[in-house]
Amino acid sequence: MSLDFDMGPRAGALRELRELIEHELPEHFPGAFTDDPADLAAAQRFCRVLAERDLLCLSWPKEFGGADASVWEQTVVREEMWAHHEPRGAQYMGSTGSGRSSCGTAHLSSSAGICRRSPPAR
């Protein structure tokens, strides 16, 4: 019996993140969690770039703004991010997106469901 270690074509292609990180982040980027506001600003800019390329909320289903990525694809992105001082900052959990996504299914976000949208701000 042998194990299948094939991560699939997209997981291998995600190694392109190395080039993206090199291009989008300052040289010697120390991570978002420093005393320098510029480091946080760089992380926030980088998160916008990742979001534009569907690389920020990998585990979420596509219908809720995610990438519906496989476990291997998520692993590749996490490895690349951790190797570069987690440039996503607090977004490393993929916890950004629309209010609808935080409610899960359409049933949960409906008035009959248990997760309801907050009333509009006044």
Image (tube, rainbow, N blue to C red):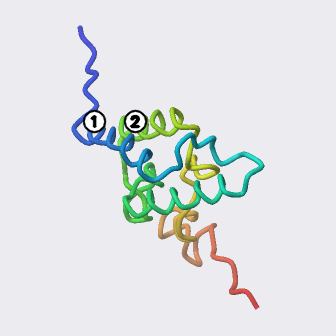
Q: Which of the 4 image quarters holds residue 40?
A: bottom right
Q: State the residue at coordinates (37%, 52%).
A: 68
Dividing the picture into quarters, in which one does residue 54 lie? bottom left
* Horizontal side, residue 94 vs residue 4: left or right: right
Q: Name the image quarter holding the C terminus.
A: bottom right
* Of the image marks 2 and 1, the number of the one nearer the N terminus: 1
Report the residue marked by disc 1.
12
Q: Indicate left or right for 17 with 5 as reference.
A: right
On the image, the x and y values in percent for residue 109 come to: 55, 71
Q: Give the image location of residue 26, x and y in percent.
A: 53, 49
Residue 56 image point, x, y percent: 47, 54
Three-letter amino acid code of the residue under disc 2:
Val
Determine whether 35 is above or below 117 in the image: above
Q: Identify which residue is drawn at 58% across, 56% down.
A: 42
Give the residue at mark 2. 76
Is residue 107 placed above or below 70 in the rendered structure? below
Local packing at callout 2 (Cα closer than 10 Å; few below 14, some 14-19, many 20+) is some
Q: Which mark is residue 98?
A: none
